[in-house]
């Protein structure tokens, strides 16, 4: 990155290195004045020895100044902007630019770009000469007011100078960039014309097509705003749709300013058309013969006229899908998106075959399939709406288009497509055909769309008949399926219970929009097995005796009694002996498996039991089947039998005459019942005399007979012992006789004991 050339003198190495560093593209090339600070140095930035004979800033190749020529009112400020560029046209920062006002020119330098801290920064030497350097960064000059439109944006590589003049005349400016080696490119000449004039070009305007518009240019003195009459203002239509000035009938017109300083022309279109006419304007100052001041062009400018026309747009909407026979609405939105009213707007809509008009808003002016609507004027930016209520008389897809027309050959077309379908509902209901009352009824309802269109708002209702209720306690089932597409099906399942027997038929119905409906029913027969048990037995039995019981189970209902089991519980006091028909005994229970008893069928079995203790027993037989149960009882009175055993023994045998003999009398109840009021009577033979008697009751002796008082009771298995003492009084083989009577004996029980007396 060095710009050193071969020169006639050999520089010191340190100087060469310093110049090489200073010669970077963005660095200031005036190495000998950089980067010293302090007071501003008003000396010329000099190149090194021999620098004028070499290209000591090889990057800078071009100087550009804007504007090169301009017209300004006196007492205003004018800004000149200089840009130093490299060979690629890119602006270069840190390059010196000198500003020189030529001798004989009016005007003075007000200020230049003096920003920065280095000593070689910009400065104004006097009112005719100044120095500045191109910027390192972008800047904005805002002129110190609140109007952003007159701000000046400066980019890197640019610098500026401000000049002004209090009087009319011309300012000739020379801008000089000493770092540019090419003498043909390092100077730029600009001129500024100062006039005591203020002009105001007509602003750009927008109007409807087909109308006229006035352009007015004002010319006044700048110093006191006095109107200037007699100035020529030339207007020229540069481009755009065909238009002319009304004053000349052509694309050009020259107008003199009047006493108010105004020069007015009127533009009109040849044919109404949208577009923009750009208009060039020149202001020509009249010559002054008395002061020998010739006329001339003061300035030029541009304005524009944009013609806008009305627009018409339409949008048509309709439901994408409807049911055949169902009314629906076409909506036509007619809008004017422009800034100009659209007039004489008409809408024409021809309905396709299969679509008939029911009503419209506004009312149609046509008839049959072609409907016409007059909307009059649609104001700018507004819209009007047409609605048509129609009906599809058949299925199919219908495209309906509307045409909108208005003045100035405006037209628009919009379409909407609607498909009319015919959905159809089918319903199938199934249920358990035959159940027992203990069973649940299983219902399945299938709803299907068998048509070619979507069934909307599909609703199912199933009102259960009296005697049937769902398992969760409801007497009706409802469901909302929403929409069902073609071929789509939905299913509902639920369970119910019957509270009584009988035949129950219930219908389910389904509905949908458009009057669609369908029904289906099914029948369930509810049956019930009813068991009846009979049990017969002897009624009375003595303990130890067998008793036969006959048990019969009958199904008196109208449903089968499945898995019927009969049980007979053996009561206390009775003992199982046997059972018929495979009855099994266990855990004091006799069980018969009877299988299924069809309606009217019976089964009979027998069980034999033995009475084991006195008393009354209830013998219960219970039959249980699926959904049925019944019991029966048979009572048995179990009686005991008293059985008296009388035993008499003599203690000593034989005995001598005069000796005593003791007889022991034992009374035993060997039966199963008590014996009561037992009376023991003993009779001694003639060869013996009674001595004494004792026992559980008192014995009364009268002659040869002893009678014991009655023994109140003698339980089964109990014994009563009596003692009778006698004395032998004669030799013989004698018989001692004992008898017993009681409430339970029908005749006395007698016993004798022989004794030999010697």
Image (cartoon, rainbow, N blue to C red):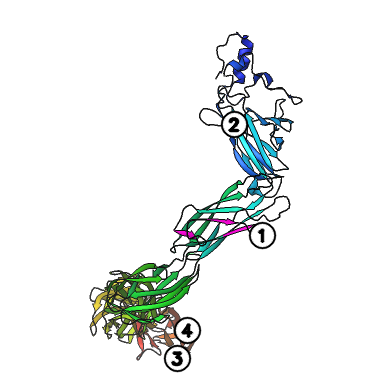
Task: Write down the quadrant of residue 406 in the picture.
Answer: bottom left
Task: Write down the region rendered in magenta.
Answer: 239-264
Task: Write down the quadrant of residue 723 in the picture.
Answer: bottom left
Is residue 475 visible in the rendered image? The answer is no
Residue 704 in the image: x percent, y percent? 42, 89
Label 1: which secondary element? loop
User: Residue 703 — which label?
Assistant: 3
Q: Is residue 8 magenta?
A: no
Q: CA distance from mark 1 to mark 2?
A: 40 Å
Q: CA distance from mark 4 to mark 3?
A: 10 Å
User: Residue 260 — which label?
Assistant: 1
Q: Is residue 252 magenta?
A: yes
User: Residue 188 — which label?
Assistant: 2
Residue 182 in the image: x percent, y percent? 55, 23
Residue 328 left/right relative to 709: left
Residue drawn at x 41%, y 72% is 332
């Amino acid at each position: 990155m060095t710009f050193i050339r071969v020169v006639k003198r050999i520089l010191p190495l340190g100087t060469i290195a310093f110049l090489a560093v200073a010669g970077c593209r963005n660095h200031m090339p005036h190495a000998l004045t950089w980067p010293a600070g302090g007071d501003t140095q008003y000396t010329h930035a000099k190149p090194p020895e021999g620098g004028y004979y070499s290209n000591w800033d090889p990057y800078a190749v071009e100087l550009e100044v804007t504007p090169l020529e301009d017209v300004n009112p006196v007492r205003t400020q004018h800004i000149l902007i200089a840009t130093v560029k490299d060979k690629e046209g890119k602006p270069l920062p840190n390059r010196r630019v000198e500003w020189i006002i030529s001798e004989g020119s009016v005007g003075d330098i007000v200020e230049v770009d003096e920003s920065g801290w280095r000593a070689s920064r910009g400065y104004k030497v006097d009112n005719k000469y100044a120095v500045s350097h191109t910027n390192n960064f972008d800047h904005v000059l805002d002129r110190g007011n609140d109007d952003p439109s007159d701000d000046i944006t400066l980019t890197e590589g640019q610098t500026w100078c401000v000049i002004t003049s209090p009087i009319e005349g011309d300012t000739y400016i020379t801008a000089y960039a000493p770092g540019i080696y090419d003498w043909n490119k390092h100077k730029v000449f600009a001129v500024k014309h100062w006039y005591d004039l203020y002009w105001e070009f007509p602003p750009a305007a927008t109007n409807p097509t087909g109308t006229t518009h006035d352009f007015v240019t004002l010319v006044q003195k700048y110093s006191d705003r006095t109107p200037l009459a007699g100035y020529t203002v030339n207007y020229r239509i540069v481009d755009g749709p065909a238009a002319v000035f009304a004053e000349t009938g052509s694309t050009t017109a020259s107008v003199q300013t009047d006493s108010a300083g105004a020069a007015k022309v009127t533009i009109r279109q040849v044919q109404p058309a949208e577009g923009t006419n750009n208009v060039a304007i020149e202001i020509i100052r009249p010559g002054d013969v008395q002061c020998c001041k010739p006329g001339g062009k003061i300035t030029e400018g541009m304005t524009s006229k944009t013609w806008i026309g009305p627009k018409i747009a339409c949008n048509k909407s309709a439901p994408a899908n409807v049911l055949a026979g169902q009314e629906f609405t076409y909506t036509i939105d007619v809008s004017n998106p422009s800034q100009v009213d659209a007039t004489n707007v008409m809408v024409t809509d021809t309905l396709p075959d299969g679509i008939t008009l029911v009503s419209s808003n506004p009312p149609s002016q046509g008839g049959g399939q072609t409907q016409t609507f007059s909307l009059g004027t649609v104001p700018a930016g507004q819209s009007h709406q047409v609605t048509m209520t129609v009906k599809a008389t058949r299925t199919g897809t219908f495209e309906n288009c509307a045409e909108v027309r208005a003045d100035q050959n405006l037209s628009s077309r919009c379409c909407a497509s609607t498909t009319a379908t015919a959905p159809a509902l089918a319903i199938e209901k199934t249920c358990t055909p035959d159940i027992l009352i203990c069973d649940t009824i299983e219902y399945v309802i299938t709803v299907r769309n068998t048509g070619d269109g979507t069934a909307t708002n599909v609703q199912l209702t199933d009102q259960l008949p009296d005697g049937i209720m769902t398992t969760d306690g409801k007497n009706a089932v409802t469901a909302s399926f929403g929409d069902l597409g073609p071929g789509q099906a939905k299913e509902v399942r639920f369970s119910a219970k019957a509270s009584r027997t009988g035949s129950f038929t219930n219908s389910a119905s389904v509905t949908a929009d458009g009057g669609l409906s369908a029904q289906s029913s099914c029948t369930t027969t509810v049956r019930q097995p009813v068991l009846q048990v009979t049990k017969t037995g002897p009624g009375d039995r003595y303990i130890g005796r067998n008793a036969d019981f006959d048990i019969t189970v009958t199904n008196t209902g109208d449903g089968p009694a499945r898995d019927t089991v009969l049980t007979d519980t053996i009561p206390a006091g009775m003992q199982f002996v046997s059972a018929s028909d495979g009855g099994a005994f266990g855990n004091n229970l006799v069980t018969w498996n009877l299988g299924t008893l069809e309606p009217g069928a019976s089964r009979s079995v027998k069980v034999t039991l033995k009475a084991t203790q006195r008393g009354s027993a209830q013998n219960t037989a219970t039959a249980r089947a699926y959904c049925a149960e019944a019991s029966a009882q048979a009572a048995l009175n179990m009686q005991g039998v008293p059985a008296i055993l009388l035993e008499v023994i003599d203690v000593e045998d034989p005995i001598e005459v005069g000796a005593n003999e003791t007889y022991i009398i034992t009374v035993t109840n060997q039966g199963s019942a008590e014996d009561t009021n037992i009376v023991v009577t003993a009779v001694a033979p003639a060869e013996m005399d009674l001595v004494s008697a004792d026992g559980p009751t008192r014995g009364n002796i009268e002659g040869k007979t002893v009678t014991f008082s009655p023994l109140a009771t003698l339980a089964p298995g109990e014994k009563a012992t009596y003692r009778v003492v006698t004395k032998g009084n004669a030799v013989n083989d004698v018989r001692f006789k004992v008898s017993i009577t009681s409430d339970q004996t029908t005749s006395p029980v007698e016993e004798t004991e022989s004794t030999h007396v010697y």
